[in-house]
Amino acid sequence: MDITIIATIVAGLLLLVATLGTVYPILPGSWLALGTLLAWAWILGSTASWTMGAIAMVFVAVGWSASAVLTGRNLKQQQIPHGSILVALVAAVVGMFVIPVVGLFVGFGAGLLGAEMLRRKDFKAALKSSASALKATGIGILIEFGCAALATSLWVIGVIWHFVAN
């Protein structure tokens, strides 16, 4: 079997994991997609692989950046300190083991609400800031997922282009 075929199959599997990783952060996400696209383009070395790989990497980087900026900006607007985020992350890890599949998300939300409740001493204000932060995080995840899925689609076009041209 040719190395380009093996590299393409492995890249496809890694891009599947990367795309799922943008939604479920226990799996590697955007950074895996960037590395996979770069390695695939380098191994195949064709005009098709470099062109579609580069365009796809731009989409992955845009999605990753948009997610980080949107979430970070919202956390700053809601004046949520790093301590509350740390508590939420620890609660997310605990939730992942306590509640299969969705525990990560439930734990993060509950941890953030609890930390904000302790800090603000006002349930309504804590709920408002936590809900806003979770909404921004959700939108960021959707943007990152959409860009990763689009990048994977562009990779498929690059695969077809490469193997038809060669």
Image (cartoon, rainbow, N blue to C red):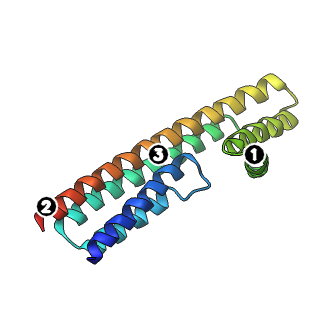
| Residue 116: % across, % down | 80, 36
Of residues 142 and 26, the one nearer the viewer is 26
**Could you tell me the amino acid type at mark 3?**
Glu
Residue located beneath label 3 in the image: 144
Disc 1: CA contacts within 10 A as few (<14), some (14-19) or many (>=20) = many
Residue located beneath label 1 in the image: 88
Tag of residue 153: none
Q: CA distance from mark 3 to mark 2?
A: 30 Å
Element type at mark 3: helix
Q: Is residue 8 rendered to the left or right of residue 108?
A: left
Residue located beneath label 2 in the image: 164
Image point (39%, 46%), residue name: 149
Mark 2 or mark 1, which is nearer to you? 2
Q: Is residue 101 rendered to the left or right of residue 160?
A: right
Element type at mark 2: helix
Q: Are marks 3 and 1 in contact (CB under 8 Å)?
A: no
Q: Look at the image and tell me in which quarter the C terminus lies.
A: bottom left
**Could you tell me the amino acid type at mark 1?**
Ala
| Residue 22: % across, % down | 52, 49
**Could you tell me the amino acid type at mark 2?**
Val
> Image quadrant of residue 120?
top right
Of residues 13 and 76, the one nearer the viewer is 13
Q: CA distance from mark 3 to mark 1?
A: 21 Å
Of residues 60 and 4, the one nearer the viewer is 4
In the rendered view, would you say 15 is above or below 133? below
Image point (36%, 71%), residue name: 39
Of residues 116 and 36, the one nearer the viewer is 36
Element type at mark 1: helix
Q: CA distance from mark 2 to mark 1?
A: 49 Å
In the rendered view, would you say 54 is above or below 93? below
